[in-house]
Image: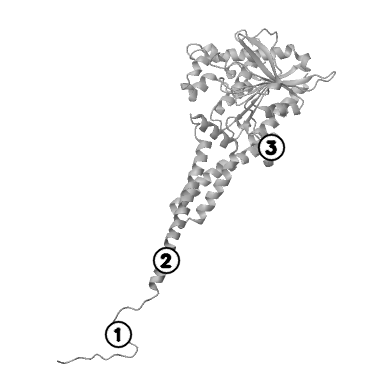
Amino acid sequence: MTTVVTPTVAGQRTPGPAAPSDSPRRGSRNGRNGPRVSCVAHFSRGLLVAVALLNAALVVLVAAPLPRIPLLVLVAAAVTSWGLVLVPPAVIGLVAGAVAGRRHPWCAGSAVLTAFVALVYGVMPYAAAYRTAQGQGQPLAPSAYFEGVNYAKAPDGDRTRRYARIGERREKLDLWTLPKRDGVRHPAVVWVHGGGWNKGHRGQSPAWNRWFNARGWSVFDIDYRLAPRVTQLDQIGDVKCAVGWLRRHARVFGIDPDRLVLAGSSAGGNLALAAAYTEGDDRVPASCAVRDSSVAGVISLYGPTDMGRLIAGTALRGDPMIPRLMGGSAKAVPARYLLGSPARLVRTDVPPTLLLHGSADRAVPVAQARELARRLDAAGAPSTYVELPWADHCFDVNWGGWGSQIARAAISRFLAIRGESA
C-alpha cells in the first residue's frame, strides 16, 4: 500500500474547520441596528403622512362647503376665523418634506403639497386684508390677532329689561347705556343678533357692545321671537317694536332719538335692513304699538339680502324650517319673500347703509351683499360697501382677526357721520 504525502507550503493552512471570524459579529451588529433603522424609517414616514393629513383636513375645513354636522361647522368656523393656525403645521410639513424627500419621495411630496396649500390659506388672507385695510385708513395689527373671542353663551342678566309683551312672550333687551349727563343726549345702536332666524340670543356679541360704548354710543341689544313659531315678517315687526320703544323712552336713557342706528349680523343683519327699509310700510307693522320706528342709519354684517335667491342657492333649500319662516313657498307667498329681501326694497330715501361681507362667506354668498350694494348705488341711496377678502361667515367671532379689524374701522367712520347728524 502506497501512501501519498502532500507537502505543506509554509504559511498555507490546511483544510479544516473555519476559524472564527468577526463577520458574524458585524452581522449581529447590523442585526441590532436593522430594527432601529426600520423604526426610524417607519416613524418618519408616519410623521409625513400625519402632517399631510392634518394640513389637508385644515384646508378642507377652510375651503370646502360647510358640513351639515353642527360640531364640524363649529370647528370649520373656528379654523376659518383664526386662519393663522394653519401656518405652523404648514411650516412643519414643508420642513419635514424637505428633510425626508430622498428617503420617502411620495410621502414627502404629499406633505409638501398639502403644506403649501395650507400656507396659502394661512398667509394670503393677511396680504389681501392689508390692501383693504389701507383703503379704510386702518393699518392691521398682527399683535391683536389673538385678542379674544366675541361670543357669550348667555345674556348678562344684570343688564336685562323688558321692552314689550307680544302675545304670551315678554321680549327683552340688554342695556349697555352710557351714564346720563345733564344736557347730553348720546347716540345709540340697536343691535340685532344673528342665528339663522331660529336661534341665538341678545348679548351673544359682547365685544361689539363694549366697542360701541367706548366710542360714545349706548347699545340696546335686543331679543326677538324665533322661528319656526313666528315668520320672518313677525321678526321684522319685533325689531320695529324695539326701535319704537327706544324712541319713546329716549329721554329716560339719555338717548338722542334722531341718532339711532340699527345694526345686526347674519340673520340679524337681514332683519335690521328689512326693518329700516320698510319703515312706514303697513304690510310690515311693528309688533307693538309704536308711533315711529325710523333710524338714522343701518349696518349689516354678512346679512342676507335676497331670500328667494339665498334659499334656492344654498343648503336652506332643504331645510324644513324655511317654509314656516317665510310663511310658505316663494310661489305661494311672493310678497313675503319680497318684504324680507332688502335688495328688493331699495329706494332713494332708504336710511344710509353700511354693508360688510366676507368674500369667502360659505353661509351667505357674497353675491347677496354685492347685489344690494349695486342697487343702492343705482338708486342714488347713501351707502358704503366693504368687502372683506378671504373672510368667512361670522368673521367677527375672532375679535382680533383681519376682517374684524377692517370692519371696526369702517363702522367707526360710518358712526362718526351718523353721530354728528343730530
- Residue visible at 59% across and 34% down? 391
Q: Which amino acid does label 1 sit on?
A: Thr
Q: Which amino acid does label 2 sit on?
A: Asn
Quadrant for the N terminus, please. Answer: bottom left
3D distance between C-alphas at marks 3 and 2: 63 Å
3D distance between C-alphas at marks 1 and 2: 31 Å
For mark 1, does the 10 Å Cα neighbourhood hold few (<14), some (14 to 19), or many (20 or more) residues? Answer: few
Name of the residue lying farthest toward the right: 182
Q: In the picture provided, is 111 more to the left or to the right than 255?
A: left
Element type at mark 1: loop
* Residue 68 picture location, percent across and down: 48, 29
**Compared with residue 248, is residue 409 higher up or lower down, i.e. above or below?**
below
Per the image, the residue denoted by label 2 is: 30
Q: Which of marks 1 and 2 is nearer the N terminus?
A: 1
3D distance between C-alphas at marks 3 and 1: 93 Å
Q: Which of marks 3 and 2 is nearer the N terminus?
A: 2
Per the image, the residue denoted by label 3 is: 134
Per the image, the residue denoted by label 1 is: 14
Q: In front: mark 3 or mark 1?
A: 1
